[in-house]
Each structure stands twice: as structure tokens, then as C-alpha cells.
Amino acid sequence: MSITFDTSYTDLPARFYAPQAPAPVPAPRLIALNESLARDLGLDANWLRGPDGLAMLAGNRWPQGAAGVAQAYAGHQFGGWVPQLGDGRAVLLGEVVGPAGRRDIVLKGAGRTVFSRGGDGRAWIGPVLREYIMSEAMHALEIPTTRALAAVATGAPVLRETSRPGAILARVAASHIRVGTFQYFAARNDIDALSALSDHVIARHFPQADGPLALLTAVVNAQADLVARWMSVGFIHGVMNTDNMSVAGETIDYGPCAMMDSYHPDTVYSSIDRGGRYAYANQPKIAAWNLAQFASCLVPLMGPQDTAIAEATAAVNAFAPAYQAAYLDRFRAKLGLADQDDGDGDLIAGLLDSMAANGADFTNTFNALAHGNARDQFIDPTAFDDWAVRWKTRRRPGWEDIAASANPAVIPRNHRIEQVIGAALAGDEAPFHDLLRVVSTPFDLAESDRAYSAPPRDEERVLQTFCGT
């Protein structure tokens, strides 16, 4: 057995990437293999678990027909322009075409590339396990996302603050093309490359789109839906730079991300987001800002500039109503509301405001709505009671089932992930597998796993997350 790779990305001009083979590792060991994802990709899980498959997942075996490239891109990082970024520790092996369609397979942490900017191109086990858990939890929550195919221990230390065990994540995505990929060529005024990239993305992701304006509209709509889904589960990406926005509409790059415990709109976890640019409530505005940068890349492809600018502006401005509609749909389901009402936005905001004032847990409050005990989440239960009077007039028949299907019972809480990482550093990977199992069925929590739904105790709270490179 082997993997037959397609390489449509490397059909683009050579300036889109740099040839790159993964750097071998001394003692690869499989930590986890996503067998259901392997089946969706048309891959043989038994082969992947075997010596040849493990060698490929570790970067020690070069698959026949693999692309082997590091992709070039640029980006705005915290609003500041960086003209060249690129894959500093990831190697695109190629694309597989299976039951799930065309998907990239990338080895993250596979060694230094021409874009590493002085880094070692490696990853340690903590960020690899975090991304594996977070991305698979997001998939189970029905949020478009990159996926984790495998986590592999390398047998080599990685030097960060201290020496830590190295690991590689085999990541799967619809593609790894970012807003920053377009920015890379726009900054160089490379119109031919922009045109080729636009055509490639349309053919690969949005075949119904007729030209760059339709592509922009499709990406705007995809991002509106994606961010609304984030907001509905209390997800905070933490680093919404333009190089971390996938044009395919998937969540990508799980660095300093987190799921909220107690609700507050200004919640920030990322240690490097000192100004709160990427706080929970700011995510829709940042998505629109990123889309404006994407639009500016496409304007040169859209005909006469005055007309193109006006059309691109209108397309970006359509994000706000598209997002608001998707947001209301998500939260109406969470509350089990009947049909639509002009006052639904105020009703949703009223609950969230009361939750913020009372330190209510985001996930548990919404999950408890269907079980009749949401008031227990409030320091002052009368705040919930007052809001519930209006809510009860808007609920539809069977609202309990609707709310239960829209509100997870369990999320990958930050303190649990940190416990998993700490255990793995001590040589115990069982907590990783337990947490992964639980968050993979977030709407169906067994009584024996009920402890995973509990918010952290004061001494367990994790208030900062890190990029983890």
C-alpha cells in the first residue's frame, strides 16, 4: 500500500512555493491516528499504522508522487503588515482525492524551510495535542475546520523555554490557501499570479463562482457562516491574522485559541493579544477587516478600477448582514425560538448581558436551558427569571429537543487541555485519548464522563494561551 497524491497546487507557477522535503526524525512513534478521517480520505488505516505509513507521517519516507513544498504567503499580523511569511514549519505532501473530496495533507512540525525565519521548523508535543483535540472537537460541533489525521512523537527534543519532546501533526484541509496567499502576490503587483490563484481557488472551492467578484462574494458568505458558528459555541480563535484566514471557509491554525468558560464579550486568552484585538466580541469585525484586505487583492482582476472598487466594497459590506443572519439563526436554535421575530436580537443580547453580569458559564448555561436548570448558573437567579418570562413566549413546540441539539454538553475546556499536555510531558497520554473521546461526541455526554462538563475550579483556571511554536 501507499498513498496516491495529486498535486494541483504545484501546477501553479514555481513562485507560489519552495520545494521542501520533511526533515527525518530519529524515533517516530504514533500517538494517535484518526481512523474515521482516514476512511473519509480513502486511506488504509492499517497501512498508516504500519512501518511505511508511520515513516510517511513522520517525514522519514518520501511518498511517491508527493509535492513536497512549503507554501508562500504574507499577511497582516495584529494589523501590522508582514510582506513574507510562508510555511515555516509545515510541508505540503500533496492532495488526496477520496470520499471526502480533495484534501491537502500537511506535516506540521516537519523541519526548517526557506520561510522559517530563523526557527527550527519543529513542534513540541503540547501544541500538537492541543490542535488535534481542538480541531476534532470543532468538527464534532459541525464547524468547518482543518482536521487532524495523526499525531506522531519524533523521539527528538525541541528547545523552547526548556527541552520538550518533539511531535508532528498530520493536518488535513480543504486547502491551505489563505487571504495572506493572495496578499503575497498583490504586494508584489504580480497580476498573473493573482489571476492564476483566483482561478485555482474557484475551480477547487467555489466552482459556481464566475470570476473574482463572485469568488469574493463566496468567501464573504463562507466566513460569515464560519464566524457565526464560532460565536455560537464561545470559541475564540486568538490570532485572526490574515495569514490565518482560509479562503476555503475552514477554521485554521489553532494556536492561542480557547473555548470560553464564564461568558464575557471582552474575553481574551492569547498571551500576545495585549490590546484585545481578537477578543470574542471583536471576531466579526476582524473577519470583515480581513475580507477587505482580500478584496483589495482581487480588485486588479475585476476590470475598470472605479467600478471594481465599488463592487468589491459592496461585497465586503455584505458581510455584516450575512453574519448577523447566520448569528441569529444559530442563537435562535440555541434558545429553541419559534420562527423569526424582529426582537430576537434583543432577546439573545439580554440573556448574554445577564450571563456576563452573573459570571454564568457559556456552555453550561445554554445546555441547561433544555433541562430547566439554567437559572442555577447565575449568581443572581432572578436575573435569569426576569429574562425567561419573555423567552417563554417565544419558544416553539418541541423547543427542548431543538435547544439540546444546538447546545453541546461538553467542550474542550482550556484547563482540561493543559492537564492533558502536562500528563503527556510526564509520559502519560491516556488523558489525551480520554478527552479526545469525550469531545468527539459533544452532544451526547455519558454520565460517567459528566466531570468533563464542569468549569474549572479557581485553582484550575487557565487565563492565557500561547502560540506554542
Image: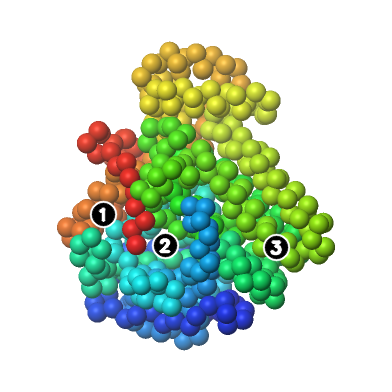
Q: Is residue 17 left or right of residue 189?
A: left
The residue sitting at 35% across, 70% down in the picture is 119
Q: From this view, report whether residue 377 is shown above or below residue 3.
A: above
Going from the N terminus, do you reach mark 2 or mark 1 first? 2
Query: How far apart, in angstroms, are the residues tagged by discs 3 and 2?
Result: 31 Å
Going from the N terminus, do you reach mark 3 or mark 2 first? 2
The foreground one among 89 and 231 is: 89
Reading the image, the residue beneath label 1 is 421
SS at mark 1 in the image: helix
State which mark lies toward you, 1 or 3.
3
Do labels 2 and 1 touch, CB within 8 Å? no
Q: What amino acid is at disc 2?
A: Ala
The residue sitting at 51% across, 56% down in the picture is 80
Q: Is residue 3 visible?
A: no
**Neighbourhood count class around disc 3 (C-alpha, 10 Å): few under 14, some 14–19, many 20 upward:** many
Reading the image, the residue beneath label 2 is 148
**Image coordinates for residue 152, horizontal then vertical, percent:** 31, 69
Q: From this view, report whether residue 197 is shown above or below residue 368.
A: below
State which mark lies toward you, 2 or 1.
1
Q: What amino acid is at disc 1?
A: Ile
**Image coordinates for residue 285, horizontal then vertical, percent:** 58, 43
State which mark lies toward you, 3 or 2.
3
Reading the image, the residue beneath label 3 is 298
**Image coordinates for residue 260, horizontal then vertical, percent:** 40, 39
Q: How is the image coloured?
A: rainbow
The foreground one among 195 and 109 is: 195
The foreground one among 313 and 354 is: 313
Q: From this view, report whether residue 429 is shown above or below residue 392.
A: below
